Image: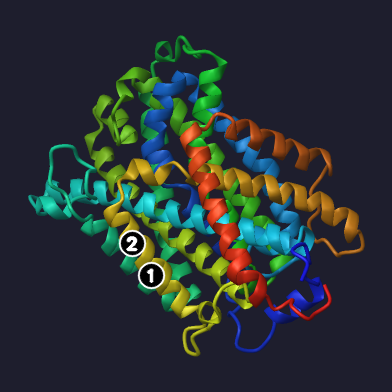
Amino acid sequence: MSIFRTKNLDTMVADARAPGGLKKVLGPMDLILMGIGAIVGTGIFVLTGTGAVTAGPALTLSFIIAAVACGFAALCYAEFASSVPVAGSIYTYSYLTLGELVAWMIGWDLLLEYGLATSTVAVGWSGYFQSLLAGVGVVLPEALRAAPGAQPGVDTVFNLPAFLIMIVLTFMLSLGVRESARVNNVMVLIKTGVVLLFIVVGVNYVKPENWQPFMPFGAGSVMSAAALVFFAFIGFDAVTSAAEEVKNPSKDLPIGIIGSLAVCTVLYVAVSAIMTGIVPFMNFKGVDHPVSLALQYAGQDWVAAFVDVAAILGMSTVMLVMAYGQTRILYAMSRDGLLPAKLSTVHPKYGTPYFATWLVGIVFGLIAAVVPLGVLAELVNIGTLAAFSLVSVAVIILRKTRPDLPRAFRCPGVPVVPALAIIFCLALMSFLSATTWIAFGIWLLLGLVIYFVYARHHSKLNGKKA
């Protein structure tokens, strides 16, 4: 019962292909749009304002630094995804290369990352949605507008819109991945079209003098902003959790991972450059709708209305894809015996892990409804950076232990590129607060307790050869 026992790749693939499993229905365009759906949301519509106040016009550099860190990690993910077409993302890759305890801990980490990212975005979605309702004269009762203590001096009790949107999206996910992908694709195309509309309209109102000084607070502020806006890139790794539902995973998964990240990086850099070119960067302080503000400065209120709608759609797709990714990680961990078997039960009609899907939707919907946004957001980035670092370590190890493994996509420059991914991720983690590190440590300690009390003894590797 070694805590570092690993799974056999052939066994993993056989389990994934067993009758009664997940349906293979996704193609490369579905995966690219899934990645864009997970990435383009809160980051571009909300965090760009906070990032601009932190770094000034050099926010564009912050996005590039965060994208480079993600890019190195994405190449590592792409190699794994092309050679290990099994649900579970980095959890599965770690089980294959680093052993059960490491796999459990990173799976436990991913449950935090995906779950709290979903809840965080649900709270942001609620704010935009209530603003839209207020525009047509509909105002919710005070008690149902936000979590307790979220608005000082206001007796809020429950964020009803945040909870309801989680339930609606959970219902969609429970009906099947093909149906969810179709809805996601439509919403992604709409919101991407609106972002392109902002770029086309906004570029005509840029004043180059607003870019001076370009780096008003020094290089440290650029790195701090990069650690903040890293949240804007979270999600492309969720594409790998779809491995068992992809028609041609060895070819299509690398396209989905790298393609979605490339598209989003170009959009982020263009939007942040135009925003800070239209509006003096300090005017974004305290603003939670920076893209709309830039258009209002330009006198283009008609486009600003489209942006608000796109923000709502954008956040919806982020929640949809992140909740999807979390259910597939739960599914993989349950199938391995590390979590109760009920979580890997597939619905005979819909072909989805039905119980796990509804569990995720209800639990994190309730968290979104009763926990303030600031508390939720603290842990998401550090969990993701830890996962990205680990997948980079794992790809180096797999090259040494399984050089014979067929790889439809090979990460270039191993071990240099994975090492650069680790360095960038650790550098960004160093700019996160002590509170975040402490809370993350507490979560990992809780995971260790659960592993030694339950998961280790129920693992399906018990009694089997690694």
Q: CA distance from mark 2 to mark 1?
A: 10 Å
Residue 91 position in % (x across, y down): 65, 61
Q: Name the mark on residue 274.
A: none
Q: Position of residue 336 (x, y in %)?
A: 66, 75
Quick check: can you spot residue 342?
Answer: yes
Location of residue 150 (image quadrant): top left
Where is residue 330 drawn, in percent x and y?
54, 69
**Label 1 near label 2: C-beta < 8 Å?**
yes
Disc 2 is placed on an element classified as: helix
| Tag of residue 365 | 2
How far from the left and from the top, in percent, is residue 57?
46, 20
Quarter of the image with the C terminus is bottom right
Q: Is residue 392 above or below residue 3?
A: above
Pointer 1: residues within 10 angstroms few (<14), some, or many (20+)? many
Q: Residues within 10 Å of mark 2 (few under 14, many from 20)?
A: many
For the residue pair 202 and 323, the one nearer the viewer reads as: 323
Q: Amino acid at mark 1?
A: Thr
Could you tell which of marks 2 and 1 lies nearer the N-terminus?
1
Q: Is residue 230 left or right of residue 303?
A: right
> Does 361 sit above or below residue 400?
below
Residue drawn at the location 29% of the way across and 28% of the way down: 286
| Of residues 393 and 267, the one drawn nearer to the viewer in this rendering | 393
Residue at position x 24%, y 27% in the image: 299
Q: Quadrant of the N terminus?
A: bottom right
Q: Nearer the viewer, residue 104 or 293?
A: 104
Front of the two marks 2 and 1: 2
For label 1, the SS is helix
Q: Which residue is mark 1?
A: 170
Q: Decide if residue 358 is on the left or right side of residue 250.
A: left
